[in-house]
Amino acid sequence: MSRYRGSVCRMCRRENMKLFLKGDRCFSDKCSFDRRPYAPGQHGQRRSKVSDYGIQLREKQKVKRLYGLSEKQFRLTFSKAEQKKGITGVNLLMHLESRLDNVVYRMGFVNSRTQGRHFVRHNHFIVNGIRVNIPSYVVKAGDVIEIREKSRKVQAVSDAMDAVVRRGVPQWLELDKDGFKGTVKSAPVREDITLPIQEQLIVELYSK
């Protein structure tokens, strides 16, 4: 699978919003987006007219990069959202929110979704008593996610759990900080995503 190895701060600048891809650094004075809030590249500060297609494409790229998916993964996720009952755009976001790599980030066990994906891949998490190493695993209401005993002393985990107070934990999740575990209280709803995302633009893009 292809993998982006460039500067992730360029992604935030390209999408003109913080995607929080570097964890704690995004809240500090070192954040590249705060220092240079314009598109990267030689002509980044120029104003250019964007077409309707361009606006839809940027919205899709923003959400794809926010959750750290490849183009193929994102397209497959959209196809699953289309097959479900309800509003396709909302289904898409709820599916992305329910991914295990996102849930461990939202609970505060890791500092970013990228780090969450890395830790899940390396068997640091247990779901309902079973080790799960698939980042795209979709959690359900009632699932209990905990950090393996051997992984609780990892410095990155300690740092992330110290910083979770600033980020906060969404209402659909419950964190037991002392027990190094969290519970999925319910399925996420659209109101749980506070970032400025216009999912309907993504639906319009894929409908062409």
Image (tube, grey):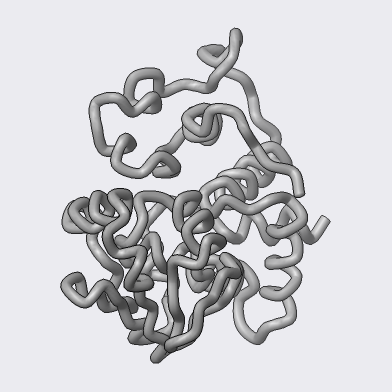
x then y, percent, for residue 39: 53, 22
What residue sits 66% from the left and 46% below the top? 56
Outermost residue toward the top?
42
* Total residue callouts: 0
Outermost residue toward the bottom?
142
x then y, percent, for residue 166: 19, 52
**Image quarter for residue 29?**
top left
Looking at the rendering, in which quadrant would you find the C terminus?
A: bottom right
Position of residue 59 relative to residue 86, above or below, is above
Position of residue 51 relative to residue 180, above or below, is above
What residue sits 50% from the left and 67% below the top? 123
**Image quarter for residue 57?**
top right
x then y, percent, for residue 42: 59, 8
Camera-side residue: 95 or 117? 117
Camera-side residue: 182 or 146? 146
x then y, percent, for residue 122: 53, 61
Say whether residue 73 is left or right of residue 201.
right
